[in-house]
Amino acid sequence: MAHVVHVTLPGGGQAPDALRQFLGRDPGFRAAGRAGWVPAEAAAEGQLGTGLDVLTLAVTGVLALPSAIETVRRWCASPGQGDDTAVELRAGETVVRVTGATSPGQVAALAAALAQGLEPEATPSTNLSASIVDQASAQPEPEENR
């Protein structure tokens, strides 16, 4: 069962799609979980909703958190990102900030903090993350990985 971590910019802004793409290309993260967009709020029946999406990381469990956080840290530190690039990861009520300067010891501490907030998928918006995992799992393996 996947656990869901929401990713936003500090202050609640939408994370860039470049981060989702980076996560999708990273072989270490592909083993830990999947990234995808889900609606920020569930739409009322017969309504279109807000059109705002939140990047989610559907991770396989608490042991996958350090790998997921390290991948986000590498994106923050990658060329083209500013020195002040940061994202916030939220699991339940727990929110942690990741930057390119986050150290390996801090990654472990952030993972431990997020683990406290991880809950198995239960809400309609996080159930969409399960479909992300299912769809990604159903994708054929790239030829270079065979």
Image (cartoon, rainbow, N blue to C red):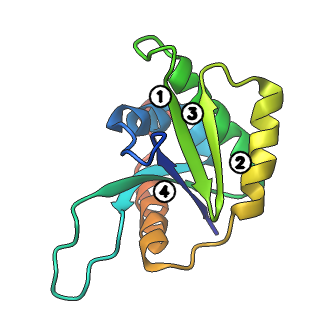
Question: Which residue is tagged 2?
Answer: 64
Give the CA distance from mark 2 to mark 1. Answer: 24 Å
Give the CA distance from mark 3 to mark 2. Answer: 13 Å
Q: Which mark is residue 144?
A: 1
Under circle 1, the secondary element is helix
Image quadrant occupied by the N terminus: bottom right
Residue type of the residue flagged with mark 3: Val
Which residue is painted at 55% across and 17% down in the image?
77
Question: Which residue is tagged 3?
Answer: 72
Q: Is residue 26 visible?
A: yes
Instruction: Check the image and report above or below for 101 versus 57.
Output: above
Residue type of the residue flagged with mark 4: Ser
Q: Earlier in the sequence, mark 4 or mark 3?
A: 3
Q: Which dot, 2 or 1, sits closer to the camera?
A: 2
Residue 132: image x %, image y %? 43, 60
Residue type of the residue flagged with mark 1: Glu
Residue type of the residue flagged with mark 2: Ala
Q: Earlier in the sequence, mark 3 or mark 2?
A: 2
Give the CA distance from mark 1 to mark 3. Answer: 24 Å
Residue 128: image x %, image y %? 41, 69
